């Protein structure tokens, strides 16, 4: 079998140029990292006093510090989970509203989506925490953060779901109408499941965005992962070390979600291929 590619196989000269370029970039990156480490060492940023509370279990501050960070991480995950659920539910409702809206009120749905898409997340969070109490809506800080995150991310998810519905062949809906299904049944049982399945990698990628945006909760005093890190910095005076650890934790979490998206996409593609192969076998058997 021959593998189809969208580019020509590089020749010997192109391979040598690519090798030299890769080596050159690697040398530059290594030189920059070396310079950064030497500079940090000269400024006393690599000492045990700076890193011990974060990486040395025998350090007396290690336990309380990680208890504080652990509580902040749980608060971050709680806010992210609530925002994810609400964004998915409200985003799906918005997507269905835009797809099925009559012409006389469709402008209102589109206007709401475009308005919330244009508002920065940090402003949405700040607006929720400052304006809602003026109307007597007193909530805990986590809900102000969740409302701000949901206001932005639900419209993004709405557009993702709508794109998935519009990408489906029209024959899917027409076949469902032909067997007597109502419009609601077609959307609920035929179009939505396929749209979610097709756009699932994009939806999971948006979950990464929600998780990262929870770090904006510090502007309203929510004790999330970043806020707890700021408290540690105020007491220990090690901002570089603390923020590096916080960044590593976020990278690990976001990488795990990204790998989940890749795994889901692979499973979906594999399932479709298996279904196609099974259909082909059934047709072949029926032909015999």
Image: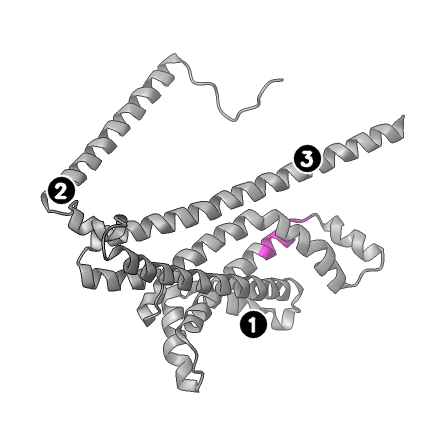
Report the residue marked by disc 3. Answer: 273
Asked if residue 167 lies in the magenta stretch, the reply is: yes
Lateral position of residue 71 relative to residue 239, left or right: right
Estimate how packed mark 1 is, as few (under 14), some (14 to 19) or many (20 or more) residues with alpha carbons within 10 Å: few
Report the residue marked by disc 1. Answer: 108
Q: Secondary structure at mark 1?
A: helix
Comparing 85 with 187, the one in front is 85
Quadrant housing residue 37: top left
**Residues in magenta?**
161-168
Lateral position of residue 43 relative to residue 160, left or right: left
Lateral position of residue 266 relative to residue 46, left or right: right
Q: In this orientation, does residue 120 appear?
A: no
At horizontal 34% and vertical 16% (from top left) the residue drawn is 16
At horizontal 73% and vertical 54% (from top left) the residue drawn is 190
Can you give x and y, in whole percent of width and height, for residue 152 in the image?
A: 46, 64
**Which secondary structure dominates the residues rendered in magenta?**
helix
Q: CA distance from mark 1 to mark 3?
A: 41 Å
Going from N to C along the chain, the mark reached first, 1 or 2, is 2
* Residue positioned most to the left: 42
Comparing 175 with 33, the one in front is 33
Q: Nearer the viewer, mark 3 or mark 2?
A: 2
Quadrant housing residue 288: top right
Q: CA distance from mark 3 to mark 2?
A: 55 Å
Q: Are marks 1 and 3 in contact (CB under 8 Å)?
A: no
Can you give x and y, in whole percent of width and height, for residue 165 in the image?
A: 64, 54
Q: Secondary structure at mark 3?
A: helix
At horizontal 45% and vertical 53% (from top left) the residue drawn is 208
Q: Nearer the viewer, mark 1 or mark 3?
A: 3
Q: Which mark is residue 41?
A: 2
At horizontal 23% and vertical 56% (from top left) the residue drawn is 60
Q: Is residue 44 above or below residue 140?
A: above
């Amino acid at each position: 079998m021959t593998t189809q590619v969208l580019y020509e196989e590089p020749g010997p000269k192109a391979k040598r140029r690519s090798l030299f370029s890769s080596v050159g970039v690697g040398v530059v990156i290594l030189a920059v990292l070396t310079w950064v480490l030497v500079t940090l060492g000269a400024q006393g940023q690599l000492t045990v006093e700076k890193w011990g509370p974060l990486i040395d279990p025998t350090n007396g501050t290690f336990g309380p510090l990680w208890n504080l960070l652990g509580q902040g991480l749980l608060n971050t995950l709680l806010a992210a989970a609530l925002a994810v659920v609400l964004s998915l539910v409200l985003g799906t409702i918005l997507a269905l509203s835009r797809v099925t809206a009559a012409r006389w009120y469709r402008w209102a749905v589109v206007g709401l989506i475009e308005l919330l898409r244009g508002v920065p997340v940090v402003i949405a969070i700040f607006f929720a925490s400052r304006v809602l109490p003026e109307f007597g809506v007193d909530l805990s800080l986590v809900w102000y953060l969740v409302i701000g995150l949901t206001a932005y991310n639900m419209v993004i998810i709405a557009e993702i779901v709508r794109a998935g519905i519009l990408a489906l062949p029209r024959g899917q809906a027409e076949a469902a109408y032909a067997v007597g299904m109502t419009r609601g049944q077609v959307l609920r049982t035929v179009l939505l499941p396929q749209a979610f399945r097709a756009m699932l990698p994009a939806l999971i990628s948006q979950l990464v965005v929600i998780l990262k945006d929870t770090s904006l909760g510090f502007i309203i005093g929510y004790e999330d992962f970043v806020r707890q890190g700021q408290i540690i910095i105020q007491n220990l005076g090690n901002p570089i070390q603390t923020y590096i650890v916080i960044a590593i934790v976020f990278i690990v979490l976001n990488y795990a979600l990204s790998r989940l998206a890749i795994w889901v996409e692979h499973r979906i593609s594999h399932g479709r291929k298996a279904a196609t192969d099974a259909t082909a076998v059934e047709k072949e058997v029926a032909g015999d």
